[in-house]
C-alpha cells in the first residue's frame, strides 16, 4: 500500500529524493509494447533458479560433514 508519507513500512524522510517517482508507483507496460519486447517477463522457473541460494564455498558442506564424523562423544 503506497501512501504519501511512507516508503514500504517506513516513514518517508523529509526531502526524500525520489518521493515523486515513488508516488508514481510501479510502471505498467502494455503487452507486446517496445519495452515488453526488449524486457520479456522471466518465467517463474528461471527466476527461482536465479535467486536460489548457492554454495559459495565449494566443498564446505562436505568438509563439515567429515569433521562431524570424526568427532564423537566418548562414553
Image (cartoon, rainbow, N blue to C red):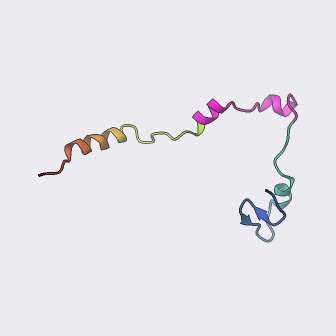
Residue nearer the viewer, 42 or 59: 42
Residue at figure coordinates x 33%, y 38% from the top left: 62
Residue 28, position in %: x, y? 85, 41
Residue at 26% from the left image edge and 40% from the top image edge: 66
* Residue 68 on the magenta segment: no
Is 73 rendered above or below residue 41?
Answer: below
Image quarter in which the N terminus is found: bottom right
Residue in view at x 45 percent, y 40 percent = 55
Quadrant for residue 15, please give it: bottom right
* Magenta-drawn segment: 30-49
Extreme-bottom residue of the structure: 14
User: Which residue ends up furthest to the front in the rendered image?
Assistant: 75
Q: Position of residue 42 (x, y in %)?
A: 70, 32
Taking 3 as reference, is 51 left or right?
A: left
Query: Is 10 left, or right, of 68 in this rendering?
Result: right
How many numbered marks appear? Answer: 0
Query: Residue 35: x and y, percent?
Result: 84, 34
Q: Position of residue 58 (x, y in %)?
A: 40, 37
Amino acid at each position: 500500500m503506497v501512501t504519501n508519507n511512507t516508503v514500504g513500512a517506513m516513514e518517508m524522510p523529509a526531502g526524500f529524493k525520489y518521493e515523486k517517482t515513488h508516488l508514481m508507483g510501479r510502471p505498467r507496460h502494455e503487452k507486446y509494447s517496445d519495452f515488453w519486447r526488449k524486457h520479456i517477463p522471466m518465467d517463474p522457473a528461471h527466476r527461482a533458479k536465479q535467486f536460489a541460494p548457492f554454495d559459495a564455498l565449494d566443498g564446505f558442506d562436505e568438509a563439515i560433514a567429515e569433521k562431524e564424523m570424526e568427532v564423537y562423544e566418548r562414553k
